[in-house]
Amino acid sequence: MLSIRNLSKTYANGVQALCGVSLEIPRGMFGLLGPNGAGKSTLMRTLATLQEADDGEITLGEGSDRIDVLRQKEEVQKILGYLPQEFGVYPRISAETLLDHFAVLKGIGNSRERKEVVQALLHQTNLWEVRKRRLGTFSGGMRQRFGIAQALLGNPRLLIVDEPTAGLDPQERNRFLNLLSEIGENVVVILSTHIVEDVSDLCTRMAILAEGQVLATGSPQEVIAGLHGTLWEKAIDKHELADYQGRYEVISSRLFAGRPLLHVWSATPPGNGFAPVAPDLEDVYFHTLRRAGSAAAQAA
């Protein structure tokens, strides 16, 4: 279990990236969902011991295995795997050579043990057949899988991946998510993303973060259930969009067969041709962000 309590961070320019963030994250896949600028990367870097928090507490484990993440950085680094949003590689070096180098840096000094670990990780991430190729020739998905391979060195208890599927084609995305799912059976994996599908497809627990604050938390099924019976759908003409946005609480609008298809929130049937529709996690996400934005505007 990873426990985050009242974590806050304000940068020197006055931007408050985290404001009293508290989360309980069990073993398995945990999705941290939020727009760009929500504070996700700040939280990930803090968990990865790459920056300091102003206030709060983070602990990993229980009893005699309990680690104070903010104060025992060296202990955290021994059991941490981290794939940042921007992951650079040496383009002229082969995957096998660079992974071996990372293994040395991780403290795996015995050459036989290191060879076994590197080979196992290349097989696990489906990179064995291309292990001799230079990393500069890898596709985006292959580079991400190599990033996971280096993050898994040392059998981490905590794995952090920040925006891992951004820019991947559908096939590479599915391959990468399947790999994460296998890993998440045994360790705490935090998936930080703004892509709703990644969380709904993969995570058993999740939180929505915006403006440095936790807006919702639970399982995807639990947060979706909160919208049951309150979501309505209607296709309209393009010239009607502004009028409907002024009259209804429009959660989302997307084009379907060339016409805007609206999802609106209403506790009672809105009439006017709207039909009930089953919510999904994207509806929850947009609804949560819209409500938070409205509350912030009223407070200002």
Image: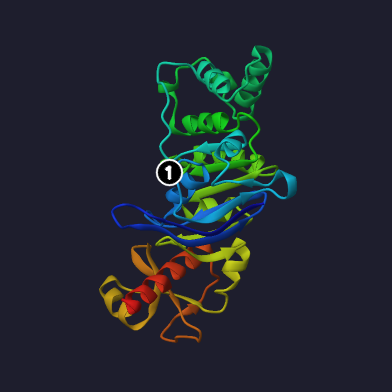
Q: Position of residue 182 (x, y in %)?
A: 66, 40
Query: What's the residue at 49%, 86% (across, down)?
Result: 269
Name the one closer to the observer, 187 or 212. 212
Kindly indicate the quadrant of the structure image that contains residue 129. top right
Q: Residue at x 53, y 38 (%)?
A: 82
Q: Position of residue 202 (x, y in %)?
A: 60, 50
Is residue 241 positioned above or below 208 on the image? below
Q: Which of 176 and 96 is in front in this view?
A: 96
Tell me which corner region of the image, top left, top right, bottom left or bottom right, holds residue 131: top right
Q: Residue furthest left?
A: 239
Element class at badge 1: loop
Q: As drawn, which residue projects farthest toward the right?
A: 63
For the residue pair 297 and 141, the one nearer the viewer reads as 297
Q: In this view, does 226 lie above or below 190?
A: below
Tell me if I can see residue 194 in this picture: no
Q: In this view, does 9 lie to the left or right of 78?
A: left
Counting labels gives: 1
Q: Name the residue tied to disc 1.
A: 166
Q: Which residue is drawn at 30% across and 74% down?
A: 241
Q: Where is residue 104 in the image (x, y as percent from the top left)?
A: 57, 19
Q: Describe residue 277's horizontal placement relative to residue 88 as left or right.
A: right
Front residue of 25 and 242: 25
Residue shown at 40%/37% (left/top)? 86
Q: How is the image coloured?
A: rainbow
**Residue 218 visible within the image:** yes
- Amino acid at pointer 1: Ala
